[in-house]
Image (cartoon, helix red, strand yellow):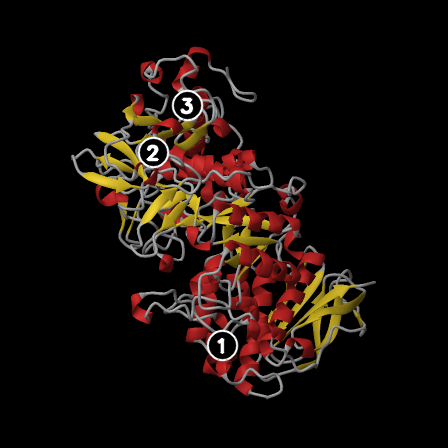
Amino acid sequence: MAKRGERRLGAASAHCLPHHGDSVRGAAAAPATLLNRPAPYFGPMKRPATSGSVRRIDVKPRKPLPLVADDPWLTDAEPVLRQRQVRLREALGYIRQADGSLKSHALLHTRLGLHRDNARKGWWYREWAPGAQQLWLIGDFNQWQPEEVPLVRLAGGYWEVLVRDRDFPAPGLAHGSRFKVRVRDAQGRLYDRLPAFTRWTGQDEETKDFAARVWYPKEPFAWTDAAFDPAAHTEGRAPFIYEAHPGMATEDERVGTWREFADTVLPRVRRLGYTAVQLMAVQEHPYYGSFGYHVSNFFAPSSRFGDPDDLKYLINEAHRLGLLVLLDVVHSHSVKNYAEGLNDFDGTGHQYFHSGDRGYHHGWDSKLFDYGRWEVRQFLLSNLRYWLDEFHFDGFRFDGVTSMLYHHHGEGRTFAVVRDYFGPDVDDEALIYLQLAAQLVHQVRPGALCIAEDMSGQPGLCRPLDEGGTGFDYRLGMGLPDFWITLIKEQPDEEWKPSRLWHQLTNRRRGEKNIAYAESHDQALVGDQTLAFRLIGPAMYSEMDRANPHPGVERGVALHKLIRLLTASAGGEGYLTFMGNEFGHPEWIDFPREGNNWSYRYARRQWGLAANGFLRYELLEAFDAAMVTVLREHRALESGYARLLHQDDPQQTLFFERGGLVFAFNFHPVNSYPQFEFPAPKPGKYAVVLSSDAAKFSGFGRVEADETEYFTAPNPQAPNVGMLTAYLPNRTAVVFKLVD
């Protein structure tokens, strides 16, 4: 019988592997029943056309796609965009034929891997390894005997075994048990591997060997977040994202835990006004210094930070505090390790990944998925649903999307012409996967966010599928931090031109939402410098006492505030910061490695600097919180694009409006303007709601957010636009709002 909510396909229902909890063979069935079933419908996938080619379709003239109508530059690309829609419909058609729906298709994790069968008093273990000659389950339940528990080959390259409790001394396979799968691969080689659907791992402290562990606690985690609706926090609301690495979120020189992060960092995030936490390093990775981007076990939360219930505790607490939790998911590549990862699992060289050079990323030293293979795509889609269902994540930041989209992985490309986005360099199979992924996420968890780490500017990436897009919600504004770094390195701020700043901050595709940021984890890694360190330098270690004047520190602090406010207010439809950077954390990030004697000194956060009471770090944090509050309260990022009011390069001033707020910037290092006149969007009375020069933000107190009233004067050339006159000190930003 089909489960409630599942579509029964009649005779074709036999094509699906049984779901977790189903009676696999039936109480009275012979052990070989499953072997007699037809092959599971896992392919072959219908491959439409080779990568980059366009298969034109004869259709009657029709209205242009909304994506093209909004951007005539894409007119010549419309056949390709429509072909992408056709390929997506074809892919969805095969999925529905096989599994009834996309949501049902993404349930492979409920069938493969290790699953308890209480009716049969045992454990089913299933694996996909089409090229393997033989598989055995080994573990402490059988004293790691190598060939005692063989798996049976099924049709389609699948294997299974039922491990009965009665066949092994107590406790047998039980919660916490360590196990692996021994594989005789296509070449006849023997390897002990971690199962592909491992949900919990453990590393031996002495040997450093990773093994899968059984996760089957006596009591399931007691969720209390049933009332938390991500849609209520995302629809029509700009996300303010606090990017964080749980392991380095403690002040101590050690690895932090999920629960410590939940208890100490989450309240901080809420206090600062951010609405979402983006967690890095969630998926299991053997090398801590990879920052979590060389994933080995895609269904296992990193064991360094605790067990799966500890991660659930974190997310449950975040929801209690009204915070979204986003997973920095890595589907762009995988660690090349054999012992822990998926690399050459069955010995064919092309099971999960492309064979040969196409399956290897030289820059990242990692393996690349074959997105055109049915089983691989189902594996990745099921991985997304698993994190949504099992852990209640509220969406994903997809890592390395540019690498996925193009055969050249975006390396050394400028993306200057239409062909760069729609020609033979595009990986159409990866694009289909991303379209399916975005659709699945939105179906499984309405309101969940899909954010793409894409630096290419792929048109339509963040437009709906029916408009010719890929279906993501946001793209990371990756060019913004690079711009700020280049500007600070190559040009003194005395020469900064507001016109250039405005162009860089607002030069993005209309109709596609961006997450703006001045720096993320990328800008803080060893070999680079944080924004604060670039601006202040070594004086951060000795001259940050708020009572001691220091020209270099005062300059750096002032520019740090201006850069972040300009980025947040004009650069996108959402905003992101990396933990600690909101108060100008002085240290770079360097994980324990041989080159630093395996030290944790720089793999932590010095929260005490912002709580010291005597240092400027606290005041920088206060400004960041006030900035986020003002932007949120006035819905500035939700109100469309910022509108330029005035800019003056010689005077280094910039004025724009967004969300009814007037943003006034004076980047000049020396000149203050006592009576500077600039246009206001509407005539009336204005008040200051934020000043970077306020004393409580480590400014000089020349302009404060107080009761001072600013009245517009008539503008003879524009009767509906008033002219404001205000004091605009050097290296200061002031935000006005209309009050009457």
Q: Horizontal and vertical percent for residue 310?
A: 52, 49
Left or right: residue 235 versus residue 597 is right
**Please, is residue 481 above or below residue 333 in the view?**
below
Q: Horizontal and vertical percent for residue 147?
A: 23, 32
**Disc 2 marks which amino acid?**
Gly
- Quick one: label 2, few (<14), some, or many (20+) residues within 10 Å? some
Return the residue at label 2. Answer: 372
Return the residue at label 1. Answer: 535
**Please, is residue 313 above or below residue 346 in the view?**
below
- Quick one: label 1, few (<14), some, or many (20+) residues within 10 Å? many
Q: Secondary structure at mark 2?
A: loop
Q: Quadrant of residue 171?
A: top left
* Image mark for residue 23: none
**Please, is residue 58 above or below residue 427 in the view?**
above
First-in-chain label (2 vs 1): 2
**Disc 3 marks which amino acid?**
Tyr
Work out whether residue 690 or residue 629 is closer to the camera in this orientation and state it: 629
- Residue drawn at 46 percent across, 70 percent down: 530
As drawn, the residue found furthest toward the front would be 169
Return the residue at label 3. Answer: 94
Left or right: residue 95 versus residue 350 is right
Q: Horizontal and vertical percent for residue 469?
A: 49, 39
**Please, is residue 586 above or below residue 184 in the view?**
below
Q: Quadrant of residue 49?
A: top left
Q: Is residue 405 visible?
A: no
Q: Evaluate if marks 2 and 1 touch, with contact meaning CB atoms under 8 Å apart.
A: no
- Quick one: label 3, few (<14), some, or many (20+) residues within 10 Å? many
- Residue drawn at 76 percent across, 61 percent down: 682
- Residue drawn at 33 percent across, 19 percent down: 39
Q: Is residue 226 visible?
A: yes
Q: Secondary structure at mark 1?
A: helix
Q: Quadrant of the C terminus?
A: bottom right
